[in-house]
C-alpha cells in the first residue's frame, strides 16, 4: 500500500518535472526579449530539477545514492538562482534594454546591444 | 517504472533541443549563455535519470560533479564575455552584488 503510494508520487513528480522542463524550453525559444527568456528559463530550471530529483529520490529509497541526489538537489537549488541573477545583472550593466509595452512598435531593443551584427535593418 | 523514466528522459531531451535552438539563434551573447545554462542543468538531470534506469549508481557522482562544474563555467564565461579578461575586477563586475 505504502509502496504504491510512493510509486504514484514518484511518477507524478517525474512527469510534472518533464512537463515543466518542456514549458521552460518553449518559453526560452518563443519569448520576445532577453529578460522574459531569462524568467522562463530560470524559474522552470529550478522547478524541473527539484521535481525530477525528488521523484528519483523516492525511487532510490534510503541509501547512499539518495544522499548524493540530495546533494545535487541542494546544489542546484543554490546555483540556479545565483546564475540567473548574475546573468540579469551582467545584461543590465551591459545595456540590454527590456522590451516594454509602450515601445512595441519599435524594433526589439535587445538588438541594440549587438548593433555591429544587425545593422542591416534601418 | 522504467517507462516513466524513459518518458521523462525524452521530455528532457526535447527541452535540450529547444535550448540548443535558442543558443544558435542568439541574438545577444546573454541569450546564448542562458541557453547553455539550461542545457547544462538538463544534462545533470539526464545523467541522474540514466543512472536510475540502468542501475549504475556510480553515474550519480558524474551528475554531481557536472552540476558543480556547470555553475563555475557559467560564471566564468559570463565574466569573460563581459570583461574580456578573467583577472580584472572593473566597474560593474558581476561579482559586485
Image: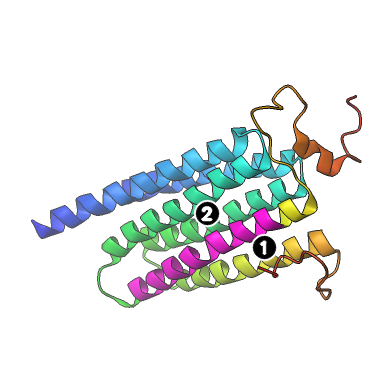
* Rendered location of residue B7, percent (x, y): 39, 43
Residue matched to label 2: B42
Specify whether B28 is left or right of B34: right
Q: Residue at x 86, y 64 (%)?
A: B84
Q: Which residues are magenta?
A: A65-89
SS of the residue at dot 2? Answer: helix
* Rendered location of residue A7, percent (x, y): 21, 54
* Rendered location of residue A59, percent (x, y): 28, 61
Which numbered tag is attached to residue A90? none
Specify whether B45 is left or right of A95: left
Looking at marks 1 and 2 on the same chain, the residue that comes earlier in the sequence is marked by 2
Q: Residue at x 48, y 73 (%)?
A: B61
- Mark 1 vs mark 2, foreground winner is 1
Front-most of residues B37 and A6: B37
Q: Could you tell me how far apart the alpha carbons at marks 1 and 2 are, in whole angstroms?
A: 14 Å
Residue matched to label 1: B74
Looking at the rendered structure, whether the residues under marks 1 and 2 are on a common chain is answered as yes
Image quarter where the C terminus of chain B lies is bottom right
> Which chain is home to disc 1?
B
Magenta-colored stretch includes residue A19? no
Front-most of residues B41 and B86: B86
* Rendered location of residue B53, percent (x, y): 37, 58
Residue furthest to the top in view is A105
> Which chain is home to disc 2?
B
Q: Where on the picture, by quarter, is residue B68?
A: bottom right
Residue furthest to the left in view is A1
Magenta-colored stretch includes residue A87? yes
Visible in this render: residue B24?
Answer: yes
Specify whether A47 is left or right of B1: right
SS of the residue at dot 1? Answer: helix
Amino acid at each position: 500500500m505504502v509502496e504504491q503510494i510512493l510509486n504514484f508520487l514518484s511518477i507524478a513528480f517525474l512527469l510534472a518535472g518533464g512537463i515543466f522542463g518542456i514549458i521552460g524550453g518553449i518559453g526560452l525559444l518563443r519569448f520576445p526579449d532577453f529578460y522574459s527568456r531569462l524568467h522562463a528559463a530560470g524559474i522552470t530550471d529550478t522547478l524541473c530539477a527539484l521535481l525530477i530529483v525528488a521523484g528519483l529520490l523516492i525511487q532510490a529509497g534510503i541509501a547512499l545514492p539518495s544522499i548524493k541526489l540530495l546533494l545535487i538537489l541542494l546544489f542546484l537549488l543554490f546555483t540556479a538562482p545565483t546564475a540567473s541573477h548574475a546573468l540579469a545583472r551582467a545584461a543590465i550593466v551591459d545595456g540590454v534594454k527590456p522590451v516594454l509595452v509602450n515601445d512595441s512598435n519599435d524594433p526589439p531593443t535587445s538588438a541594440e546591444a549587438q548593433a555591429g551584427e544587425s545593422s542591416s535593418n534601418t | 517504472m522504467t517507462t516513466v523514466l524513459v518518458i521523462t528522459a525524452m521530455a528532457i531531451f526535447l527541452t535540450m533541443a529547444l535550448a540548443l535552438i535558442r543558443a544558435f539563434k542568439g541574438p545577444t551573447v546573454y541569450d546564448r549563455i542562458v541557453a547553455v545554462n539550461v542545457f547544462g542543468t538538463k544534462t545533470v538531470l539526464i545523467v541522474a535519470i540514466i543512472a536510475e534506469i540502468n542501475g549504475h549508481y556510480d553515474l550519480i557522482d558524474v551528475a554531481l560533479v557536472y552540476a558543480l562544474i556547470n555553475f563555475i563555467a557559467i560564471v566564468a564565461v559570463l565574466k569573460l564575455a563581459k570583461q574580456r579578461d578573467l583577472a580584472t575586477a572593473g566597474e560593474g563586475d558581476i561579482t559586485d552584488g
